[in-house]
Image: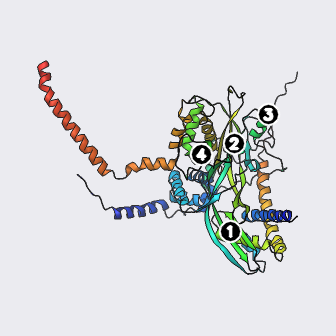
Amino acid sequence: MYVAVKGGERAIENAHRLLAHERRGDRDVPEVTLAQISEQLSLGVDRVMTEGSLYDRELAALAIKQARGDMIEAIFLIRAFRATLPRFGATEPVDTGQMQVRRRISSTFKDIPGGQILGPTFDYTHRLLDPQLADGFLPEPPATSDTSPVAMPRVTDILGRDGLIEASPRADAVLPVGDLTREPLSFPADRDLRLQNLARADEGFLLALGYSSQRGYGRSHPFAGEIRLGEVEVEFMAEDAGFAVPLGSITLTECQMVNQFKGSATEAPCFTRGYGLAFGQSERKTMSMALVDRSLRARELGEEIIAPAQDEEFVMSHSDNVQATGFVEHLKLPHYVDFQSELGLLRKLRNEFSEAADASSPMQEAAE
Amino acid sequence: MIAARENSKQVQRQAAMAALAHSDGGEIAGRLAAIALPAYENLREPENGLVMVRGRIGGDGAPFNLGEATVSRAAVRLATGEVGFGYTLGRDGQKARLIALCDALLQSNEFADTVEATVLTPLRAAMLSRGNQKAAEAAATRVDFYTLVRGEG
């Protein structure tokens, strides 16, 4: 039986009105502003920018407010918004070696040129809830100390000078940079596409995969060669101006994982690398990304592919939380017709089953 | 010789654009208000769009697409013919237009020095001061390792 379904408009309208009311919460409590979200929930904003794949703090703050703090919903809103604007082109690749560093640590070398700079970190906090923050806490201004302009080379650049670590892959002048927002994914995927996919991938998914690779699902013996956070300049080759114009700076987090490699018939043993890069202060994200990037290089490095984190089709097809939530959550939309047909089929099968049972039962009795 | 002069002019324009892009739109407007501006027209109305931000594999390798950023752009032409371009991260079209205006003024013999002194010099100083403050805050979190026990004897 086919049932055409119509109606529900008024219910939907009232549901959205109720949603707006619930979003606002108790009206005696002051409304949260975008500046408050951007300034005080800044790591949430960073995550929405990274996984929404759009660097714009104000829009990410708006998305978080609209989504009532539901990060995946906020990321969904940002992805939908980016589809409404024209793309002027691609920037010049950013140079993280020239970063205005606010945090930079290495777990491989104690004495790195430029030093270990802890920056604004949760590391070494006691993870005890702080009742002072419950209301009106005014923190001390940050300590300052003299700066001398020292170069802060990436740790991987230092290792690279002695040939102890593989070089980064060189740009191919012929091949365009892969862009999964323009062409659908196909496999095998090159590392540029994999990194784009991982950069916008769900943090929790990458965290779990990275963790699995550490626990033995796929070989991985990583060291955090370097993690750095800070501002990098962005330049854009403007056709009209005829030269690369500066656009300002963005905050990035970069993670360089250093991993074992036993060498091959043609290559001496050396360290290999996994790379993570994300908008804002996104340390857990970039560390997980770097672990998974390295795991996904199994094919290239001739390693046996035995674990989920090494399977590029599995990882790349399930990493996007907007796609994932779309498919999971679509299950709650009306499936009345689908279900009717399943129901009809099930009734038919059950009838056949009981008829067969009835037909065979006298014989069974006879056998007993 | 001419090429070198052109190049140095371009470097100067790029440096000015960087200082402007790093500054608040309202701040640029405030500085420009002190100058008796010449007539100009909008060659490109302020327009918002996206750029795909690229990183490099391993920090120094082949490029890959990291994610997009919002950008605003505009272009203006002075009555005397100089064309200026304005680009900035974000969606502040008015700021993009003011950057374009400054870029055009910097190419005009009549206004270049005034814009440099009235607009760019203070903006650069503010930008430097913000950068120094952040660097000093970061520097205070630099770890000084010391040895607890020396392996003597």
A231 lies left or right of A365: right
Separation of marks 4 and 1 at Cα, in angstroms: 32 Å
Q: Which mark is residue A162?
A: 3
- Label 3: how many residues lie within 10 Å, few (<14), some (14-19) or many (20+)? few
Picture coordinates of residue A154, whole percent (x, y): 75, 42
Q: Earlier in the sequence, mark 2 or mark 1?
A: 2
Contact? badges 2 and 1 (CB < 8 Å): no
Nearer the observer: mark 1 or 3; the answer is 3
Nearer the observer: mark 4 or 2; the answer is 4
Separation of marks 2 and 1 at Cα, in angstroms: 33 Å
Viewer-proximal residue, A38 or B100? B100
Q: Residue furthest top?
A: A368
Q: Which mark is residue B58?
A: 2
Q: Which residue is mark 1?
A: B96
Contact? badges 3 and 4 (CB < 8 Å): no
Q: Chain of mark 2?
A: B
Residue A25 in view, yes or no: no
A169 versus B15 height, above or below: above
Q: Chain of mark 3?
A: A
Q: Amino acid at mark 2?
A: Gly
Q: Which mark is residue A193?
A: 4
- Label 4: how many residues lie within 10 Å, few (<14), some (14-19) or many (20+)? many
Q: Amino acid at mark 3?
A: Asp
Residue at left offset 51%, top offset 38%: A314
Viewer-proximal residue, A35 or B7? B7
Q: Give the structural element (helix, strand or loop) at label 1.
A: helix
B70 lies left or right of A336: right
Separation of marks 4 and 2 at Cα, in angstroms: 14 Å
